[in-house]
């Protein structure tokens, strides 16, 4: 890739390699796409690793009625790589720097949400994939690709001490779990539950532990017990066992629900203490049934959270650098992506797939 500085806004397009799905029932296959040449505020990144989020699978298979998928779909929003080119107005990055991109690639920059660093709530936000592309038309294409071009505000610095394959998942699984725990005051001495030990769940355990909380993992998978403790859990509960669940009635300050499929959340609401909160980050399409009485007693609350703003994402990455936190990953070549999706559906991933994008060169 060229390393020259770019000076004007309209720079045309170039070709990039990617993996795309043609329909909700199609497999991801190799393709060639157009990317914009970087404009004055853009950063071009050679992608080294891209994590596989369960949201990629939901989106590729068109499982979300609120966000219908436009095909071809090129997912991937856990991106880490190296800067290959910067626009003339870019001061934060230079060629050769490590850089990362998460779920957001643009927003209006002027609304109250953007002004307070909460770009994830901007009404005009552009997601990394399956969002209207203001530059090339059609939809944005994500990180299952050899390169990407992103406005500098949405590009993050990567701490130099961390393993890059394990950094990629921080850009979604990391910030999605870090942000609500900061918001709800997870600190030393709080009792925190994490429901589901997958990509998001295992990051939640690491962060809650690092924040000093007493961490309890709720899982459906007996075989994840030892891992949960190794990741930082103090206790682990098999959620299908009512006796184990009952022991914790009205005792939690905070519970983070990361489950990707339909399940009964009332069982967890019962476990919250007075003013306790359960935050949903897992995104099954079907609405949850919530018992009013479960919330009335103990003044419990339920809420949701979606990724995090850019400043907080950088804060999270810096926190990870300082505390040596990365995701536990199974590194795969992109040619194994369809198999990885099937394994993710069986909760058979420890605990995030990270695609080594070097592999796309051979396709
Ligand atoms: P994942 O790696 O597949 O983990 C999900 C975990 O949920 C599984 O490992 C499993 O944990 C548990 N689970 C799966 N099916 C279940 C069922 N039928 N009943 C009970 N538990 C079940 O997925 P992920 O990448 O962490 O994503 C989790 C969810 O968060 C997805 O819906 C994704 O779209 C969403 N998400 C939301 C945001 C946001 O900003 N809010 C960001 C990223 C992802 P155990 O084996 O321990 O039971
Ligand atoms: Zn994600």
Image (cartoon, rainbow, N blue to C red):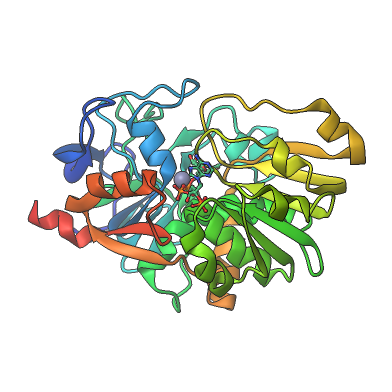
Residue 229 x, y percent position in the rendering: 58, 71
Residue under the point 24% across and 48% down: 339
Residue under the point 45% across and 26% down: 64
Nearest to the observer: residue 11 or residue 214: 214
Q: How many numbered marks appear?
A: 0
Q: Is residue 248 left or right of residue 116?
A: right
Q: Is residue 85 left or right of residue 79?
A: left
> Where 105 sits versus 195, above or below?
above
Residue 83 x, y percent position in the rendering: 32, 61
Residue under the point 73% across and 71% down: 212
> Where 315 sits versus 143, above or below?
below
Residue 226 x, y percent position in the rendering: 52, 71
Nearest to the observer: residue 243 or residue 197: 243
> Where 158 sits versus 8, above or below?
below
Q: Is residue 285 left or right of residue 297?
A: left
Kindly tell me whether residue 273 is visible in this rendering: yes
Kindly tell me whether residue 128 is visible in this rendering: no
User: Which image quadrant: the N terminus?
Assistant: bottom left
Residue 136 x, y percent position in the rendering: 29, 29
> Where 171 sits versus 137, above or below?
below
Residue at far left of view: 362
Nearest to the observer: residue 240 or residue 7: 240
Residue under the point 78% across and 55% down: 248
Nearest to the observer: residue 156 or residue 332: 332
């Amino acid at each position: 890739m060229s390393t020259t500085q770019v000076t004007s806004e309209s720079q045309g397009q170039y070709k990039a390699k990617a993996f795309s799905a043609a329909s909700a029932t199609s497999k991801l296959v190799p393709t060639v796409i157009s990317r914009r040449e970087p404009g004055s505020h853009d950063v071009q990144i050679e992608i080294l690793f891209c994590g596989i989020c369960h949201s990629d699978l939901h989106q590729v298979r068109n499982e979300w009625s609120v966000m219908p998928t436009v095909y071809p779909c090129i997912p991937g929003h856990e991106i880490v790589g190296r800067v290959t080119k910067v626009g003339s107005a870019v001061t934060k990055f230079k060629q050769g720097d490590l850089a990362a991109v998460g779920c957001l690639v643009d927003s209006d920059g002027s609304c109250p949400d953007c002004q307070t660093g909460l770009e994830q709530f901007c009404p005009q936000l552009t997601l990394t994939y399956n969002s209207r592309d203001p530059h090339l038309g059609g939809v944005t294409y994500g990180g299952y690709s050899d390169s990407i071009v992103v406005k500098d505000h949405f590009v993050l610095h990567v701490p130099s001490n961390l393993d890059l394959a394990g950094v990629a998942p921080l850009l979604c699984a990391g910030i999605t779990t870090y942000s609500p725990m900061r918001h709800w005051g997870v600190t030393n001495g709080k009792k925190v539950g994490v429901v589901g030990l997958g990509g998001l769940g295992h990051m939640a355990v690491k962060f809650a532990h690092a924040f000093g909380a007493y961490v309890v993992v709720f899982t459906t998978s007996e075989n994840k017990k030892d891992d949960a403790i190794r990741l930082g859990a103090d206790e682990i509960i098999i959620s299908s066992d009512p006796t184990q669940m009952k022991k914790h009635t009205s005792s939690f300050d905070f519970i983070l629900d990361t489950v990707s499929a339909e399940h009964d959340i009332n069982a967890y609401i019962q476990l919250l203490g007075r003013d306790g909160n359960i935050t949903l980050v897992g995104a099954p399409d079907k609405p949850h049934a919530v018992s009013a009485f479960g919330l009335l007693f103990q003044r419990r609350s339920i809420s949701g959270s979606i990724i995090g703003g850019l400043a907080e994402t950088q804060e999270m990455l810096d926190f990870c650098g300082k505390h040596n936190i990365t995701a536990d990953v199974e590194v795969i070549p992109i040619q194994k992506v369809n198999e990885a999706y099937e394994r993710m559906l069986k909760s058979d991933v420890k605990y995030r797939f990270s695609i080594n994008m070097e592999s796309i060169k051979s396709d």
